Image (cartoon, grey):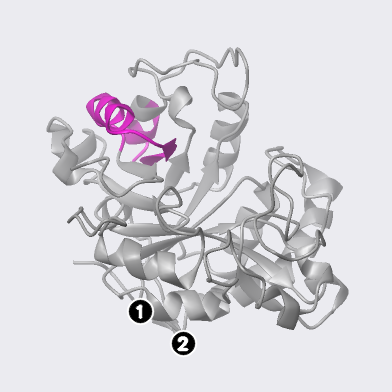
Amino acid sequence: MFGIPNIGRRTVLKATSAAVLGSYVGGVVSAEGRDGGKLPDDESTTLIAHRGFAGVYPENTVAAMEQASRGRSGDGAAKRGAEMIEIDVVPCGGRPHEGDDFEVVVFHDDRLASRDGGERGLTDHENTLVWETPCSEVRTAEVLESGETVPTLREVLSVIPSSVAVNIELKNPGDTDVRFAEKLEGGDLEDRKDVWRPFTRRVLDIASEFENRVLVSSFMEAALATTREYDADVPIAFLFWDSIDVGLEITNKYDCEALHPPYNMVAGSPFFNDSYYIDDPGFADIDLIERAHDEGRAVNTWTVGTWYQAEQLVDAGVDGIIADYPGVLD
C-alpha cells in the first residue's frame, strides 16, 4: 500500500506522489479533490495525536506514545487510536552547529521549566535551555509531575508501533535565533541552513532506524530546506503561523507534500479568522483546502481540542486533525 524504499538504512515513506502521502495523512488527495471527489468523513480523516494527546497524557513522553498508539483515554474508555503521532524534537547537551556532542530528545520548549511566560513549569528542573543542559539532567527531568521523564527520540520511536506514522516537528536546532515562520532569502537562508543541518541529519538518521512512516514539519524554513537537502524522499509540511501568503510561498518553494495551518485558517469552517493565538488575525481570504487539493497536497490542521471543532473541520475538508484528545473523531 505504501511505497517504502530502503535508502541505506532509511525506512521512510517514499513521497512519489501526494496520493501516496494522502493515503496516510487523511484520504487520497488528487487533482479532482480529496478521496476522488467524495465528501469528507470521519473515517477518512487522519487522527494525529498532538504530542501524544497532550490533553490526556503527559506530553511528549514514552507513556503518552504508548497510550496514544493504543487509543485509550485515561479512564480506560475505548477511543479511536491515532493513525499518526506528532512529536517535537530538540537537542540536549550541546549546540549541534558548533560541533558539540548532543542527543535528540522529544521535548517542546526551549527551556526545561518555562511555560506560558514562566508562569508554570513543564518539568521539575531549573529553567535552563535544553541544549545547554547535560543530557543526563534533561533525561531525568520529570514532566508535569507525572513520574515520566524527558525521553530520547529513539526511546519514543521504539514504543510507537510501525503501523502508526510519526510527524516529527523540528522545533529547535540548539539556537535562539530560529527565524520563526519567516521566508528567507540568500545569505540569511544559507546561514540558517548551516545551523540546522547537523541536527536535521541526526534526526533523520535516527528515524531511519525504525519502520514507521515519517512526515517532517516545522515553522522554520531552513529546517525543511535541510530535510529536502538530506533526503528528498521524506515528506515535509510547513507549519503556518501568522500569514497564509508566507505559508503558501514556502510550501510551493519546497513542493511540500502537506501543509499544517491552525484551525482558524481553514476557510469554510466557522472558525476562519477567529482569534486563537493571534487577536483579530485578518488572514487573507484564501481557501487553503481547495488550493492544497488542487495542487495534490494534504491539509492537517492544529490544534483541535473539541469534537465540535473536529466535526466542522472535517466537513470543511481537512485531511488530518492534529488533536489533544483521542475522542474528537469518535
**Magenta run includes residue 309:** yes
Which picture quadrant has residue 229? bottom right
Q: Position of residue 134 (x, y in %)?
A: 79, 78
Residue 252 forms part of the magenta stretch: no
Q: Which mark, residue 296?
A: none
Residues 127 and 277: in front is 127
Residue, x 69% and y 64% (percent of image)?
A: 124
The reply to whether residue 25 is in sight is yes
Amino acid, disc 2: Arg
Secondary-structure class at tag 2? loop
Q: Position of residue 8 (x, y in %)?
A: 47, 87
Instruction: Residue 211: give its label.
Output: 1
Marks 2 and 1, how far apart at CA: 10 Å
- Mark positioned earlier in the residue sequence (2 or 1): 2
Q: Nearer the viewer, mark 2 or mark 1?
A: 1
Q: Is residue 297 visible?
A: no
Q: Is residue 285 left or right of residue 203?
A: left
**Vertical placement of residue 263 versus 146, above or below:** above
Above or below, 288 relative to 20? above
> Residue 326 appears at what percent x and percent y?
30, 49
- Residue 276 appears in which quarter of the rendering? top right
Residue 54 appears left or right of 189 = left
Name which residue lies at 31% across and 73% down.
4
Question: Which residue is more in the foreground, 114 or 90?
Answer: 114
Tell me the magenta residue range. 291-318
Q: State the mark number for residue 9.
A: 2
